[in-house]
Amino acid sequence: MNENKLIDIIRNLTKSRYIGDDCAHLPELGIVVSQDSLVEGVHFNLDWMSPHEIGVKAVKVNISDIFAAGAEPFYGLVSISIPGTYSESFFEELYSGILDGAKASSPEFEIVGGDLTGSDRVFISICVIGKTCGRNISSRGHAKSGYKILLSGEHGSSAAGLRLLQQGKSSPEILINAHKSPEINADFARLISKNVKKPYAMMDTSDGLADALFKIALSSDVTISVDFEKIPYNPDITIFDDWKNLILFGGEDYGLIAAVPEQNVPEGAVIIGDVIQKSDVPLIIKNDNGITKYSSLEGFTFNHFS
């Protein structure tokens, strides 16, 4: 199975106009809504992450989608499934991590409910509601030819950190911390959503930088051309031979990609490419060795169902 095809099935069955972005924008209510789930053994491993670290990351990755929409996180509902053999102290540490991660990401954010069930492993599912007042809400379908591609955050670090953990290593610590506790780009999101008045596209890079670029290009019916040499990264990732692939396809960095009109590019913003008229492929990556065209990312990005 393929995640994107499953989403197409859901969209066809529901006929919902809201499905397509990471957040559902409900303008009549003045909110955006998003929900993500983390599963033990898929998204985190208790052998190398504490319950508190898992809680912090679980809420951060959900709040990231709200910022990527251009909204401000406000309320959250937390559902947790946990084996009955786990201690109450484990649960308390996990939930404290959720609260600490929420406060660090957005001081106004408040947990207002949720659900608890037993299970054979830890599942965390968080629904986040964001306010849209005073913000221009993004959509991945709003990129237009002539727009500039902006990027916040370094890329490749989280994937490198995960690989180090899988290898039983404890350094470079900066890479491991990038995986355990990703940075959320709240200031960048607020700057864009408060100052760009025309329709624009913005996504986080949780599924990989190339994945976000590709999805924006497809949804907007354009081609995106990126200069690889302009993508920020931590030089420590070059300990891996395939570090360039980690930058493009690694995922879980939670940076933000924005496609905005040239006149709305903030001073000092990192510009990595351009939106151009639709060509034969959605995504073009330029580097010192030439140009690579991507008609598909199958085989490059993570698939939950492979």
Image (cartoon, grey):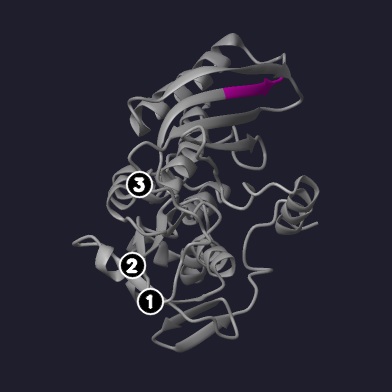
In contact (CB < 8 Å): disc 1 and disc 2:
yes
Residue tagged by mark 1? 146
Magenta span: predominant SS is: strand
Relative vertical location of residue 184 with respect to residue 218 in this rendering, above or below: above
Query: Is residue 224 in view?
Result: yes
At 49% from the left edge and 44% from the top edge, which residue is drawn? 65
Can you identify the residue that label 2 sits on?
261
The local secondary structure at tag 3 comes to loop
Residue in the picture at 78% in, 53% down: 12
* Cα–Cα gap, marks 3 and 1: 24 Å
The amino acid on which the numbered mark 2 sits, given as a three-letter code, is Pro
Q: Residues within 10 Å of mark 1 (few under 14, many from 20)?
A: some
From which residue to which does the magenta span run? 78-83
Name which of mark 1 and mark 2 comes first in the sequence: 1
Q: Secondary structure at mark 1?
A: loop
Left/right of residue 79 with respect to residue 235 in the rendered view: right
Of label 3 and label 2, which has the lower sequence position?
3
- Answer with mark 3 or mark 1, whichever residue precedes in sequence: 1
Kindly report the distance in space between the C-alpha atoms of the residues bearing marks 3 and 2.
20 Å
Under mark 1, the amino acid is Gly
Q: Is residue 15 magenta?
A: no
Task: For the C terminus, give its image quadrant.
Answer: bottom right
Query: Which quarter of the figure has residue 269?
Result: bottom left
